[in-house]
Image: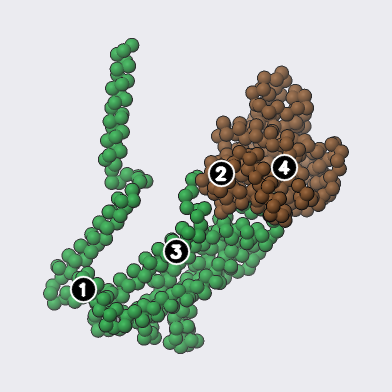
């Protein structure tokens, strides 16, 4: 894709830090509620990181600050060592709510982000077709979101965001509103797509199994105030991403990690 | 155990039976029940016929000497036709339509951008909204003397009254419509790199458009109710003026024909807005949530 030039020069080094969160605090209600308390973390290139934790632990707040949709009360956030000053297409975001534009067809929705970036018509059309196939929506290209199911709407949003070729993909409980079987399909589809697109990913979830399936690394948040409780590499997958969920469940080490996370969640409940 | 199986079979037959029965004989007062297209038409016509029946009955029961104060439906319809063919009533209708649609067009020109901007920008809202909210409580009719002094007994005066009667409500409605646009649509556009201008014109405007057409449809109905007030004072033409003149000579049939005219025009206007919404927003036709 010759026309999709990014403003940011990325260090080609595989270990380059893509996102850096540095001593960030976020307070609401003029200081009386601390959502995020002095958090620091680093995200390396091509990593898939999952933020997990109980409701109100600040995981979504951190994600939104990385997206540039919120500014911290204290501390700083960097993308590719540049301060984050606002939202941009280099950090694509998928929301839990369906955000495909209802007045645009699937095809027009996927094209929309590229249009904003000024991608030429020809490149846009080719790439839209590619992504329609990637998310299996070829047969719904001319449908409006109103006639799509929840899972399909979410696939439109994913295709629209990835078609912009973001450096980082931010997902805020992207499958939270879907039923169990669709959720499973979507998780496997994400592993497939992320593998092809080589994107760095942060996904927020409170589903432990989803966290383990998607992540290379799990960051566990605690609440009141929102802090990082643990930073856990998903070592049992041996640095690989497993395309089928049941294959992952069969691996030795899976249950141990699941129980560890359940135990941490239990502490949060009590 | 064959016995129990038989029992289950019987039970199934029974539930099937009651199921079909229930389907066939749904109660008239079924909560949130469905109505077929045909039933809608039939029920609508029945309701209309009942209305005219009661009217006719009222006319029939009125003493002969007073019958002119409650003319029959046929009399009103024939008076309507007489006005159209012999009295140049069409001119009054066109005049009233001009006042309504002209003033409402101006209302929209002001209210749509103002409402959308207020919905998008909190500081702009804080600047304008208190004044506009308060203005809704000013009775439009009380402006008549002022408008007469300013504009005299002109079309401008009548249109200004219609304008004032509707605009503050329409702005408030459009503000609410705009604020109700899903915030995630705006945030999604921002994360895709859309600028402020694109977010407002490319996301908020298309997202809010169907709701705005709906608000317009509701507010022009209010405009029709103000028409008679506007045309009662210092008017020589228009539907309201014709009715006012008829009142002076106790010609109840003409007054009622006027009411009928306004009713018909109101329904037609409503229909026009519905059709506009249907064809302008094909994506909004069937919601599947």
Binning the other alpha carbons within 10 Å of mark 1 as few (below 14), some (14 to 19) or many (20 upward) gives: some
Q: Residue B47 has which mark?
A: none
Using the rendered image, report if marks 2 and 1 lie on a common chain.
Answer: no
Which chain is represented by brown in the image? Answer: A
Q: Would residue A38 be seen by someone viewing this image from the given angle?
A: no
Of tags 3 and 2, which is closer to the observer? Answer: 2
Residue B237 in the image: x percent, y percent?
Answer: 36, 84
Mark 4 vs mark 2, CA separation in Å = 24 Å
- Position of residue A100 in the picture relative to residue B6 (left or right): right
The secondary structure type at the circle numbered 2 is helix
Q: Are discs 1 and 4 both within one chain?
A: no
Residue B207: x, y in percent? 57, 56
**Which quadrant of the figure contains the C terminus of chain A?**
top right
**Which element type, helix, strand or loop, lies under badge 1?**
helix
Residue beneath label 4, please?
A169
Residue B273 numbered tag: 3
Q: Left or right? Give the position of B151 relative to A268.
A: left
What SS does tag 3 mark? helix
- Give the label on residue A140, or none: 2
């Amino acid at each position: 894709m010759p026309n999709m030039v990014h403003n940011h020069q990325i260090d080609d080094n595989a270990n380059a830090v893509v996102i850096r969160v540095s001593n960030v605090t976020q307070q609401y209600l003029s200081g009386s509620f601390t959502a995020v308390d002095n958090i620091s973390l680093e995200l390396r290139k091509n990593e898939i990181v999952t933020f997990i934790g109980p409701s109100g632990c600040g995981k979504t707040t951190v994600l939104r600050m990385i997206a540039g949709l919120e500014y911290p009360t204290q501390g700083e956030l960097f993308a590719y060592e540049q301060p984050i000053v606002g939202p941009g297409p280099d950090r694509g975001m998928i929301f839990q709510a369906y955000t495909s534009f209802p007045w645009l067809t699937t095809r027009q929705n996927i094209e929309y982000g590229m249009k904003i970036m000024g991608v030429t018509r020809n490149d846009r059309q080719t790439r839209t077709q590619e992504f329609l196939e990637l998310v299996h929506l070829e047969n719904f290209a001319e449908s409006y979101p109103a006639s799509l199911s929840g899972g399909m709407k979410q696939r439109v949003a994913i295709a629209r965001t990835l078609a912009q070729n973001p450096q980082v993909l931010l997902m805020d409980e992207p499958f939270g509103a879907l039923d169990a079987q669709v959720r499973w399909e979507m998780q496997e589809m994400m592993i497939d797509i992320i593998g092809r697109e080589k994107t760095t990913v942060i996904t927020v979830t409170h589903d432990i199994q989803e966290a383990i399936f998607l992540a290379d690394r799990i960051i566990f948040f605690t609440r009141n105030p929102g802090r990082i409780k643990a930073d856990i590499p998903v070592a049992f997958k041996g640095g690989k991403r497993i395309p089928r969920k049941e294959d992952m469940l069969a691996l030795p080490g899976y249950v141990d990690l699941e129980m560890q996370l359940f135990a941490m969640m239990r502490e949060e409940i009590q | 155990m064959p016995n129990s199986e038989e029992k289950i079979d019987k039970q199934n037959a029974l539930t099937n039976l009651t199921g079909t029965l229930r389907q066939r004989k749904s109660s008239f007062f079924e909560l949130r029940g469905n109505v077929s297209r045909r039933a809608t038409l039939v029920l609508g016509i029945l309701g209309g016929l009942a209305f005219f029946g009661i009217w006719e009955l009222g006319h029939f029961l009125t003493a002969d000497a007073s019958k002119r104060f409650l003319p029959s439906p046929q009399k009103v319809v024939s008076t309507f036709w007489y006005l159209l063919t012999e009295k140049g009533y069409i001119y009054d209708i066109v005049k009233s339509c001009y006042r309504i649609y002209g003033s409402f067009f101006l209302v929209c020109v002001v209210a749509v951008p103002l409402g959308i901007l207020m919905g998008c920008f909190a500081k702009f809202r804080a600047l304008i909204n208190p004044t506009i909210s308060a203005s809704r409580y000013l009775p439009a009719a009380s402006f008549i003397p002022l408008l007469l002094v300013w504009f005299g007994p002109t079309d401008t005066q009548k249109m200004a009254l219609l304008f004032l009667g509707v605009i503050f409500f329409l702005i408030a409605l459009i503000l609410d419509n705009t604020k109700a646009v899903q915030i995630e649509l705006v945030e999604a556009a921002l994360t895709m790199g859309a600028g402020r201008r694109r977010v407002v014109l490319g996301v908020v405007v298309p997202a809010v458009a169907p709701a705005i057409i709906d608000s317009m449809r509701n507010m022009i109905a209010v405009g029709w109710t103000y028409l008679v007030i506007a045309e009662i004072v210092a008017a020589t033409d228009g539907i309201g003026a014709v009715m006012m003149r008829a009142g002076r000579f106790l010609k109840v049939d003409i007054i009622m024909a006027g009411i009928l005219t306004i009713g018909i025009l109101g329904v037609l206007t409503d229909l026009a807005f519905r059709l506009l919404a249907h064809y302008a927003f094909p994506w909004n036709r069937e919601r599947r949530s």
